Image: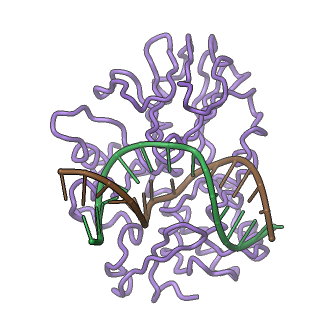
Chain colours: A purple, B green, C brown
Amino acid sequence: MVSLIGTLARVLKEPVGSPRHHANGMPELPEVESVRRQLRPRLVGRRVVAATAHPQARMGPLEPAVGRVVGEVARRGKYLLIDLDGTHELVVNLGMTGSLRLRGQDGWQPDAYVRATLTLDDGELDFRDVRRFGRLAVVTAGDHASIPMLAQLGPEPLSAEFDVAVFAARLARTRMAVKPFLLAQRAVAGVGNIYADEALWAARINPKARRVGRERAARLHGAIRAVLAEAIEREGTTFRDYQMVNGQPGGFGDALAVYGRAGRACRRCAQPLRKIEVGGRGTTYCPSCQRR
DNA sequence: CTAACTACCTGAACGC
DNA sequence: TGCGTTCAGGTAGTTA
């Protein structure tokens, strides 16, 4: 089902008369999953006839993709895994600002920020990335050793592999603060800065907490699942882009509880939300609901 | 193992 | 106007 919010946000953020593009920015698991769902029907069965990465983009060689046919389009955490012939895969990490766009779809035409292009037998797939944090790599199937974060990635949060007892045990063992622990991707895959803040607020856990017992671990486990599942339903839309352009909070106040809402009232207790730095990342939380 | 730090990138927002 | 600074944050690397 198409998200009204996502659609509106995309339309409103574009200048009048400009072509509509896919949602971009801050891709965490829900955003990457949305990309996967949009892309899969367009890519499966397509043959790669050429692949070029622009020289300033530091990516692995894409030549091994040429001549191969896309089998499945899968996802692990924030990584997109595009199967090629069953023998290779194109690993895509969108970084902060990366997006994949089909030439001509929604009026998309390449601009100065296109870092790589796959020519398919029926069109062009562009990798656009303003800040160049994104990476593409073609590896032999399942060989993720060259991508350390992917190789050590924790379980998928919405799968049965994400076990509450295992998660609680890891939390009990670590000496890290809980938020950096989540962002490290090893106990659970795909949680980035936005959804970490959202899940911690939902579970009423202070982002700096270092001792998270079994009960709170179970709450956090459930909150991660709930927050990510809802975000996927909304096509991964966040409200930040919308607010930046519009300058107004807009009528979509129910999506994000804390992210981007520093100084505003907590939805649970009405106390003002506070923004601090945890592990080098901007972190918004409720000092009243999320006590240490 | 962990923490702290740097680097990579660019554009938007902000301060004066 | 214009210029300088800060912020955004995912991943990788280094150092202590």
Quarter-of-image position of residue A264: bottom left
Quarter-of-image position of residue A246: bottom left
Using residue A146 as the reference point, say whether residue A217 is left or right of it.
left
Count up the numbered dots: 0
Using residue A129 as the reference point, say whether residue A87 is left or right of it.
right
Where residue A120 appears, as percent x and y from the top left, is 50, 14
**Which of the pair A176/B5 is nearer the observer?**
B5
Where residue A136 appears, as percent x and y from the top left, is 60, 32
Which residue sits at x=48%, y=62%?
Answer: A194
Which residue sits at x=22%, y=47%?
Answer: A12
Using residue A194 as the reference point, say whether residue A176 is left or right of it.
right
Where residue A105 appears, as percent x and y from the top left, is 33, 25
**Which of the pair A34/A179 is nearer the observer?**
A179
When the figure is inspected, residue A220 is found, relative to residue A73, above or below; the finding is below
Which residue sits at x=16%, y=33%?
Answer: A17
Q: Quadrant of the N terminus of chain A?
A: top left
- State the residue lying farthest toward the left: A16
Q: Quadrant of the C terminus of chain A?
A: bottom right
When the figure is inspected, residue A204 is found, relative to residue A154, above or below; the finding is below
Which residue sits at x=28%, y=54%?
Answer: A242
**Which of the pair A2/A142 is nearer the observer?**
A142
Where residue A70 appears, as percent x and y from the top left, is 59, 21
